[in-house]
Amino acid sequence: MPVRTDGAPRPGRGRAARAGSGQQKALVTARRIVEDMQDGTVGSASKRALASVRRLLGARGVAVSDLSGSLRWVGRPAPEQETGPLVAGVLSAERPRGKPPLVAVPLRVRDELDGVLLVSGDVATGAVREVASLMTQALERGRLERSAERAERAELRALRAEISPHFVYNALTVIASLVHSEPDRARDLMIDFADYARYSFVQHGEYTTVSEEFHAIETYFALQRAVLGDRLQAHVRVAPEVLAVAVPCLVLEPLVENAIRHGIEPRSGPGTVHVHGEADGDECVITVEDDGIGMAPEEARAALSGDADTGRIGLANVDKRLRNVFGSWFGLVLETELGAGTRATVRLPRFQPGVLP
């Protein structure tokens, strides 16, 4: 067999290179369709997705319809007197209709009709169906991601709703009792309560910083000391290098509230709660430790699993949100024993892509 030594391309190599380049372009186009369709059939990026579909199929025009039958075209629109009955037929029967040069295919998400893909031009019906399948997978993925986001927001609302109304009542009662005898202190406590309420109940967004969480904790301690007096001692220490670390909202307040309510209040005599935040390599470690009455290990497991009503506020919620955001390696760890107090440890990465306060 002759061997070329002049560096010229061998016969057939150019065709193979062109074929490989065409395959790569098709894969890139398919990926863009998946990314752009996640917003929905009428989302802001759907028109860009249709342009990619038209390019991938080599179609004259491509349109997508929502359940109302309204079409969004990219390329040359087909006559309305042809497209209207075709789309209406697909919406009513939920089956493909037509044949080249005009084909309509239903877009189903979890067995529910979400819209119709319409393709005009000399394109095989099988190819249209394959692209429709790609689009429905993207639509389903987008719906799942939006559902997950709604679930996270619902969990945060549920956690805010769990914050003890008993504490709120006691704090306001103490403030009211000081209005005449110690008006300056009552005013300061009222400002603290306003800060606490703003952070715990009103704040929007899913993430904040360690600095904001510790500020909220100090405010909470000021109110609890007003309620419990000398029965509560609190020590708060945080390393400067972790102050800017992003963290889900209301991660620490439930831990401190549980330490006081279930550790310090039931014991005889005064008790102490320590809250520390420090860096450990690429991670931030926050501990909330009390010298209260502690709990049995099975009670701690039940509190973290959320399977039983232990009365411990939001621990399972906090653990779940940490793991959802940062991964299963992170979360809430409880160390406890009856009569020996409780230590709650939160470990999270100092830097996490996509997690910003």
Image: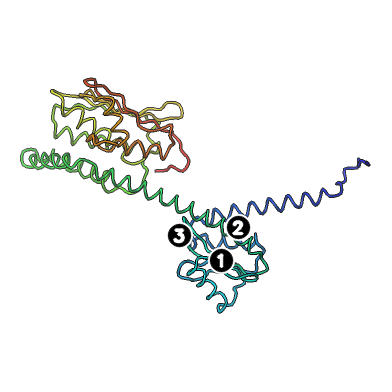
- Image coordinates of residue 32 in percent, x first then y, are 58, 54
Which residue is disc 2 drawn over? 130
Extreme-bottom residue of the structure: 81
> Mark 2 belongs to which amino acid?
Glu
Q: Circle 3: is it few (<14), some (14-19), or many (20+) Cα within 10 Å?
A: few
SS under mark 2: helix
Residue 217 location (% of width, % of height):
26, 35
The residue tagged 3 is 112
Quadrant showing the N terminus:
top right
Q: Is residue 156 found left or right of 294 in the rendered image? A: right
**Is residue 237 or residue 52 the one in the foreground?**
52
Residue type (three-letter) at the residue carrying disc 3 = Glu
Circle number at residue 96? 1
Query: Is 21 placed above or below 99 here?
Result: above
Residue 153 vertical placement versus 263 (above, below)? below
User: How many circles with numbers are drawn on the protein?
Assistant: 3
Residue at horizontal 28 percent and vertical 29 percent from the top: 300
Per the image, label 3 sits on a secondary structure element best described as strand
Looking at the picture, tell me which residue is in the foreground, 306 or 99. Answer: 99
Spatial CA distance of label 2 from label 1 is 12 Å
